[in-house]
Image (spheres, rainbow, N blue to C red):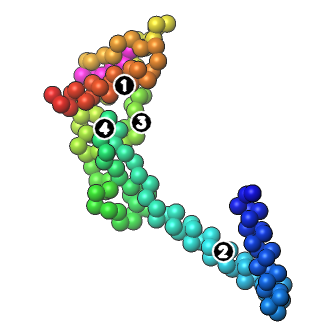
Amino acid sequence: MTAQTSTDGIRARLLAYLQTAGLSTARATANLDELEDAVREAEYRKRLEEPILRNCLFPGCLRQFDINATMSGCPTEPNRSAEGWKQVRPTVATGYVCPDHAPLMERHQPRWGERTEAGAVLTCLCGWSSPTARWAGYAVAAWQNHLIDTEEA
């Protein structure tokens, strides 16, 4: 059963009830239309206020910010502010990086290097390169490990 079918059934029962209570069909329908409009408006406003969280791309980082609050100009929780976050769009990882990891990501942006029948190599701005990988996910995982090793050094 779909939500629309369920709503139609509820609407039909409410109309029948209101008619037995002595309300005219036109008046009952108008009241139900107003009620449905009010419910839709409340649901819409609730969705506008719900947080839409974005995570830091750095492997293992759990920081988040609320992109919905940022775009709408609404106040956000202090630990979910977008201040200092950077949007990155390299060929491997697309998303957002927290202020702690943004400088590291700027120095270690990946690029696809040599592609052969055996696979592809992922290179980093710092000179690091992955082993030849048949599947892109393996090269990306190697680059992520490189990021973690670089941060620890």
Q: Foreground mark, 3 or 4? A: 4
CA gap between label 4 and label 1 equals 12 Å
Q: Foreground mark, 1 or 3? A: 1
Mark 1: secondary structure: helix
Is residue 20 shown left or right of residue 128? right
For the residues bearing labels 2 and 4, Cβ distance under 8 angstroms = no
Q: What segment carries the magenta color?
A: 121-126
The numbered dot on residue 123 is none
The numbered dot on residue 60 is 4
Mark 4: secondary structure: loop
Q: Residues within 10 Å of mark 2 (few under 14, many from 20)?
A: few
| Magenta stretch encompasses residue 122 | yes
Question: Which residue type does callout 3 highlight?
Answer: Thr
Report x, y in % for residue 65: 35, 52
Report x, y in % for residue 42: 56, 72
Q: Earlier in the sequence, mark 4 or mark 1?
A: 4
CA gap between label 3 and label 2 equals 39 Å
Question: Which residue type does callout 1 highlight?
Answer: Ala
Pointer 3 residue:
94
Pointer 1 residue:
141
Residue 26 visible, this orientation: no
Report x, y in % for residue 59: 32, 35
Q: Earlier in the sequence, mark 1 or mark 3?
A: 3
CA gap between label 2 and label 4 equals 44 Å
Q: Is residue 117 above or below residue 123?
A: above
For the residues bearing labels 2 and 1, Cβ distance under 8 angstroms = no
